Image (cartoon, grey):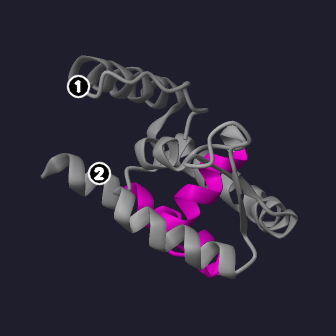
């Protein structure tokens, strides 16, 4: 419960940024993942964004309809897809980047840089110890 409370408190600091974009939390996680990591396959998005495959399918369809993502079939395997950001989505992310950075700066000012560094290190340790997926994904920026 404590971890859920911490997550809610931190995500709450970003609500005004989400509101500016008009996106849901899930949609914004996808936007951020694609911005940070570039083109990804849906299975990678599921793992990175912690969204189930059936949910992701619907969210991507809506985002594609909004003109935010583009999906292309893998040239060597038509069952696989690549998902990338549209120019519109890249601009949307750029438009809120300063606001996001300001929230990160406020959090660091409130908690202290040393504590934030320790928190990231502890989160990385917990994830490494508890990871049962067996799948190693590239590390994300301090997101």
Q: Is residue 112 visible?
A: yes
Residue 140 colored magenta? no
Provide the residue span drawn in magenta. 9-35
Q: Which residue is mark 2?
A: 6
Secondary structure, mark 2, is helix
- Identify the image quadrant of residue 37: top right
Tell me residue 53's x, y (percent): 38, 57
Q: Which residue is mark 1?
A: 132
At horizontal 23% and vertical 25% (from top left) the residue drawn is: 132
Above/below status of 89 relative to 116: below
Badge 2: how crowded within 10 Å, few (<14), some, or many (20+)?
Answer: few
Residue 31 colored magenta? yes
For marks 2 and 1, the one nearer the N-term is 2
Above/below status of 132 relative to 24: above
Tell me residue 141's x, y (percent): 61, 32
Determine whether, in the image, residue 82 is placed left or right of residue 114: right
Tell me residue 94's x, y (percent): 82, 59
Question: Between 105 and 59, which is closer to the camera in this rendering?
Answer: 59
Determine whether, in the image, residue 109 is placed left or right of residue 131: right
Tell me which secondary structure the magenta stretch mostly adopts. Answer: helix
Determine whether, in the image, residue 124 is placed left or right of residue 139: left
| Front tag of 2 and 1 | 1
At horizontal 46% and vertical 44% (from top left) the residue drawn is: 43
Q: Is residue 16 visible?
A: no
Q: Residue furthest left?
A: 1
């Amino acid at each position: 419960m404590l971890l859920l409370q911490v997550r809610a408190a931190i995500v709450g600091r970003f609500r005004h940024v989400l509101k500016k974009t008009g996106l849901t939390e899930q949609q914004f996680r996808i936007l951020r993942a694609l911005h940070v990591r570039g083109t990804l396959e849906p299975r990678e998005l599921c793992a990175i964004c912690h969204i189930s495959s059936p949910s992701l399918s619907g969210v991507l369809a809506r985002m594609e309809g909004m003109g935010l993502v583009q999906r292309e079939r893998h040239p060597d395997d038509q069952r696989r897809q690549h998902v990338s950001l549209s120019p519109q989505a890249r601009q949307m992310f750029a438009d809120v980047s300063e606001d996001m950075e300001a929230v990160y700066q406020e959090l660091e000012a409130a908690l202290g840089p040393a504590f934030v560094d320790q928190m990231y290190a502890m989160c990385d340790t917990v994830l490494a110890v508890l990871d049962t997926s067996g799948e190693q994904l590239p590390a994300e920026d301090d997101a």
